[in-house]
Amino acid sequence: MAGIYIHIPYCKQACHYCDFHFSTNLNTKSDLIEAILKEIELQKDYLLGETIETIYFGGGTPSILSIQELSDVLHKIYENFQISENSEITLEANPDDLGRPKLEELKVAGINRLSIGIQSFDDQILSYFNRAHNSKMALDAVKYAREIGFENISIDLIFGVPNQTLEALKNDLEQALELNTPHVSIYGLTIEEDTVFGKWEKQNKLTPLDEDLAAEHLVLIMDTLAAVGYEQYEISNFCLQGFESKHNSSYWHGKKYLGLGPAAHSYNGVERQFNYAHNIKYIKSIQSDKLPFTIEKLSAEDQVNEAILTQLRLKDGINHADLKQIHDFDLIKERRVLINEFIQKNMLELNGNFLSLTSNGKLLADFITEKLII
Ligand code: SF4
């Protein structure tokens, strides 16, 4: 089983923290959709006939597409790939795009999972982020989606905002829990260089939240969500039973996937392909029948590091027996002293074949990962 990811590189406006690949100039949109339709045909053999279990429209803002554009892409995928009957078909969407009529059309078009970029229920934070929606739009979007029959709904939140108090975060979490969506993704804000926040930091107009306070935020998030039955199946992802994101889980478990559109990448088990992160170069390349990617062959070392990086973030942790069998790397033997130290400090735990982070370890996940990789 494999997955397909489609990157839609357009947004209404640029959020101040975002360094994803997107443009706010929509003039190339119809050419780009044409190019994606052609790329689907050119890449139809990439997954060697494997059945597709998940389709994921990410971005950018996929909900900026018209229903016609979205349906055209989906039809082309169905024409060229074998899609499993119970496939998970996710659309990332912003609340300001999710009026009732659009939601009804999305349902008819075959979208069965929504990942809604809410980020916060605090209007001051939303405007500080330069988001295009306010909290009322966010609440309405989830309410309408439910009424129209979407059951598999995820919301995205951000914590660790400069000057954000624990009290403010608590309010955000309370609002989120009232919505009772079966999936919640919560990411710590990182200040990236080529963003408005990055510039503000350089000009001393923004001070990132203190690391200790950010760790307290994460503890509050983990405790609050666990208390009402959410499982933290990946450091930033929480779900009620049976509502894990199948698509993202397939990345973390090293399954194959095809990425379409600018900046998308693909993985066939051996190599990773990166599509040009430039809308016009991508379109021109496809128009001249050339696939728009560069290839990165993963060395044995890269593969081990990737497995450690992704699996340590998972609830079950790293399957070190698999790591040894598949990649010929005996993590427990190679990192024995370090692992014992982390176990003694109650940051790692070893259960049979699995090495995982404890709750304490999750607060220092990046530091521990860095120590374990080759
Ligand atoms: S956060 Fe999402 S909506 Fe905002 S600029 Fe980035 S991709 Fe676009």
Image (cartoon, grey):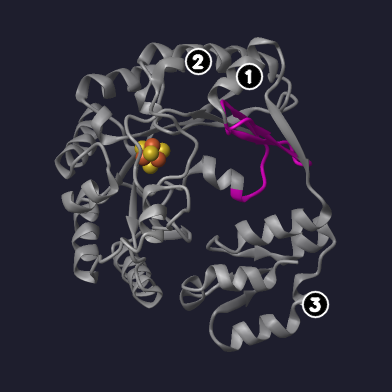
Between marks 2 and 3, how big is the CA–CA gap? 50 Å
Q: Residue at x 82, y 51 (%)?
A: 299
User: Magenta span has 274?
Assistant: yes
Q: Is residue 195 above or below residue 329?
A: above
Q: Amino acid at mark 1?
A: Phe
Judged from this view, the residue extending furthest toward the left is: 136
Category of crowding for the residue at label 2, using alpha-carbon neighbours closer than 10 angstroms: few (below 14), some (14–19), many (at least 20): some
Return the residue at label 3: 333
Tag of residue 33: 2
Residue 239 visible in image: no
Residue 99 figure quarter:
top left
Between marks 1 and 2, how big is the CA–CA gap? 18 Å
Q: Residue at x 59, y 89 (%)?
A: 344
- Quadrant of ligand 1 in image: top left
Q: Amino acid at mark 2?
A: Ile
Which of 309 and 90 lies nearest the eye of the viewer?
Answer: 309
Q: Residue at x 53, y 84 (%)?
A: 346
Magenta residues? Answer: 252-277
Return the residue at label 1: 81
Judged from this view, the residue extending furthest toward the front is: 203
**Picture coordinates of residue 84, whole percent (x, y):** 57, 26
The label nearer to you, 1 versus 2, is: 2
